[in-house]
Amino acid sequence: MAALLHLRLNSSILPSSSSHPSLRRRPCRRPAAPSTRISAKIREIFMPALSSTMTEGKIVSWVKSEGDRLAKGESVVVVESDKADMDVETFYDGYLAAIMVEEGGVAPVGSAIALLAESEDEIPLAKSQASSSSSSSSSSAVPASPPPAEAPASTTSLQTLAPSPPEPSPVAASSSTHPASDGGRIVATPYAKKLAKDLKVDLAGVAGTGPMGRIVAKDVEAAAAAAVASVPSAPSKAVVGSVAAKAPTPLAIQLGTVVPFTTMQGAVSKNMVESLSVPTFRVGYTISTNALDDLYKKIKSKGVTMTALLAKATAMALTKHPVVNSSCRDGKSFTYNPSINIAVAVAIDGGLITPVLQDADKVDIYSLSRKWKELVDKARAKQLQPHEYNTGTFTLSNLGMFGVDRFDAILPPGTGAIMAVGASQPTVVATKDGRIGLKSQMQVNVTADHRVIYGADLAAFLQTLAKIIEDPSDLTL
Amino acid sequence: MPASVSLSLSLPLSPAASPRSDPSVAASPFGAFRRFGLRFCGLRREFLSLRSLTSEATGRISPYPARGISKKVLAAAKSNGSPTKGFDYDLVIIGAGVGGHGAALHAVEKGLKTAIIEGDIVGGTCVNRGCVPSKALLAVSGRMRELQDEHHLKALGLQVASAGYDRQSVADHANNLASKIRSNLTNSMKALGVDILTGVGTVVGSQRVKYGKVGFPDTEVTARNIIIATGSVPFVPNGIEVDGKTVFTSDHALKLEWVPDWIAIVGSGYIGLEFSDVYTALGSEVTFVEALDQLMPGFDPEIGKLAQRILINPRKIDYHTSVFAKKITPAKDGKPVRIELIDAKTKEPKDTLEVDAALIATGRAPFTKGLGLENIMVTTVRGFIPVDEHMQVMDADGNLVPHIYCIGDANGKLMLAHAASAQGISVVEQICGNNNVLNHLSIPAACFTHPEISMVGLTEPQAREKSEKDGFEIRVAKTSFKANTKALAENEGEGLAKLIYRPDTGEILGVHILGLHAADLIHEASNAIALGTRIQDIRFAVHAHPTLSEVLDELFKSAKVNMGTSPSVSEPVAV
């Protein structure tokens, strides 16, 4: 028995949520009241009442996607009620214009879950209605938001390492002219195809490493991770200056071959060139870390990490120098960011991603450490949500664990500054009182956009940062 | 039997009673007659129950044939019956698969002297290369799935370190199971004294069969009746080269000689679906190639859709529909298996797949070659032997061939092991003079995926077609495993049971189940169909709580039968 979708003309009226057990209900058409704006060709698709006891339903899956043509009687969506999963069919011909409750979302019976447009021309109109109506019309009913706005132009940057750049290229080793893609065909295993669809990876750009050069699941995962690292997607994004954490495992490279870029490498290349349009400059500083090291030893057992300590110190310094936390969006103005979000570069599987510690100045060091661990775990599992990697306002990149003592990072477009952190090393120093002593010191080097951040700004910021690190008692407050 | 016994009892009375015309006296022998008749029924029932008890313990005591005398009974009790005069056997069965076995057992029970001819190994496809070993593999795949489903285990509060398997041991389990069932089958026939004749059987005349090595059928036996039960072999379409290693059929796949990383399964029926369950559980990725426009074409569409959502979409499976595998080349010289796909309608090249292995599961073809059918003027239809509703073989002109019957896959009526066995029993009844027509709509079928799928009777489209033709209304009732306590306790709430019925009479037309232990649950419905039980009666039957059987209980209770208002109620009902 087909459960029929309940449709009504799009208006601001909520249908009475029916407790009638019958599945076949006449769609309630609202008569054209002059006072209400009615676009007669766009209908709402409602969460149907599939049983007499059902009050809300969960969208198991959309059988059709936005833009698909629907014929009367065709299955559109699978709804899970308190009793069963049911295929729900449409009552009208038309186009599925906008999905308002995504798969997995829950909506009360009678609330709109999608819009149906009569003709293809009305799809854009319906989409705009979907975004406005989901906030206004259905009283708190629809949990899902309109489809997220299209990502603006992608931005990225990568590091340029002073000494020797480690080449993270997990997929580069396999030639793109493998037998499996003879004649332009793409050979990918069923799971690889599924993953590609879920992760929105274009298989055409993925080089396969499986038997006979076929694309297997791990190739798609690698490509997706690379894409995440190289193509962030919201206004204030943070991509990286340089790599942190472990060194990527170098793969065998066949000498004498020309290996084309993978999708990730192509995106990196593009962004590197783009970064040339930003006038950057660099300011370095040497900071003693004895006190910080002592503090770290003391609170390490409580799960505090060095990364969290550095992020916290940086955030505290930024509170006093908001300009260093700003960015230049249009070449004409300062954009002062409302919160201090520290992005930290992490290398994963040859890719690069920048999990963001949000409000790092306000969150205490213990919570920050826990948050960091969670983000790294998520990054490893490739489960970071966009807001967890593209909302950074200042980026940290640390190559100290490789023994790198100083390097210089490229500024991720869209942000104002990035700080490259070198290793802390015991150094023989002359102190002001004329003595010679041994101190642990690390060098930091900030790259900034000179349109908004000037030399004195950075100098003052670094001085503040040095003070905080050299007397870190405030970090644990 | 009732006739002879009643007569002997009534004889002493009737000579005395019949000369008299006094109606009151005349009534008394009649009364006596009836009384004895009643008593006899009681006796007979006891006798039957005794017999069934004995048969379990010692084989079985043959019941009296209709013409039986007590001397014969003693003989029959010792062994397989003695043949009718002039014949070596009452019944010769060609093929010792499940169908032949079922027929042989029932024939002995009926007192027929029976022989069974087997050219390969006892048990046939089901036991050696089909249902039985595949169930062993599916038992493994089911457990692997449970152990790999972290989310599910976590919900139950279980912690299991990563699950792994040893391919050879899994394969051995399947092989051992097949051997065990095979010897059980052989022993059960030997114990009853069924003569097992080794060799390939050929029909020489309407009551003569030769058997022996292939091409040298040197021994001839005569039989009053012959049952052909030669079964089927995997069907391999033209253009597909089977090498048994990288391109193979279910025969090879059940040996589980290797687990390919990526296997294409050509055909998405029961066999293909079950193997997809096994292979994906063992870590393979699967690509289905289906000629029809949707997967699982044999299933009720709604069940098919749900099955796709549960058994296909979340697994590492993709599929191509509306395509034929025109050419399949096995892997060699370092090249993968190559599958050329053409559009099922336009026949134009569509795609080429390169995979590690291909399983050909495009159905089964009857194994009817070399049976000597030309000797009895029978021509096969696409290899199948034409039969009437009693499974009696028909010749090229559509006339019944006396004394020859065909059961199971070889007649193609319903290619299931238990259907073959049921047909065999029906034939034996027929031979013994009891008119018997098997109701194929009461035969259940099951697909042992995880969760299982089972069905009996008509699918919804079939029922709708029939209802339009015959002018009655049908209705559909559904219940979900989500509402079942036991299913929820097992954390296996996915599933659906669907009932198609006539609201005017309460007749069950079809039941389809997808869910935990669906294959075991279907029998309540199939028995109801076989016995003609109506929904209004079965709904009062009690089900233990909490059990999965309550899914069906709820299904029957949710059906709305309009007995009170329907005009058909005025029809006389036999009580």
Image (spheres, coloured by chain):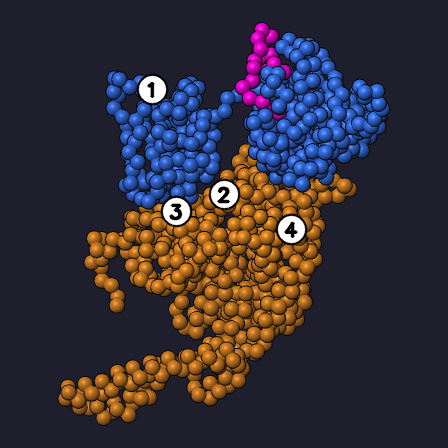
Chain colours: A blue, B orange
- What range is drawn magenta here? A323-345
A230 w.r.t. B265: above or below = above
Pointers 2 and 3 within a single chain:
no
Dot 3 crowding, Cα within 10 Å, few <14, some 14–19, many 20+:
some
Q: Is residue A42 above or below residue B557?
A: above
In this rendered view, identify the residue nearer to me: B138 or A335: A335
Of mark 3 and mark 1, the one earlier in the sequence is: 1
- The quarter holding residue B193 reads bottom right
Image quadrant occupied by the N terminus of chain B: bottom left
Residue pointed to by mark 3:
A83
Q: Residues within 10 Å of mark 1 (few under 14, many from 20)?
A: some
> Amino acid type of disc 4?
Ser
Q: Is residue A255 magenta?
A: no
Give how far apart the Cα atoms at labels 4 and 1 are: 57 Å
Amino acid beneath label 1: Ser
Please tell me whether mark 4 sits on a helix, a strand or a loop: loop
The residue under label 1 is A39
Which secondary structure, mark 1? loop
Question: In the shown orientation, is residue B239 left or right of residue B41?
Answer: right
Based on the picture, tell me whether residue A337 belongs to the magenta stretch. yes
Measure the C-alpha gap from mark 2 to mark 4.
26 Å
Question: What's the residue at 56%, 18% (across, down)?
Answer: A337
Name the foreground residue: A5 vs B523.
A5
Residue, disc 2:
B309
Tell me how far mark 4 sits from mark 3, CA to CA. 33 Å
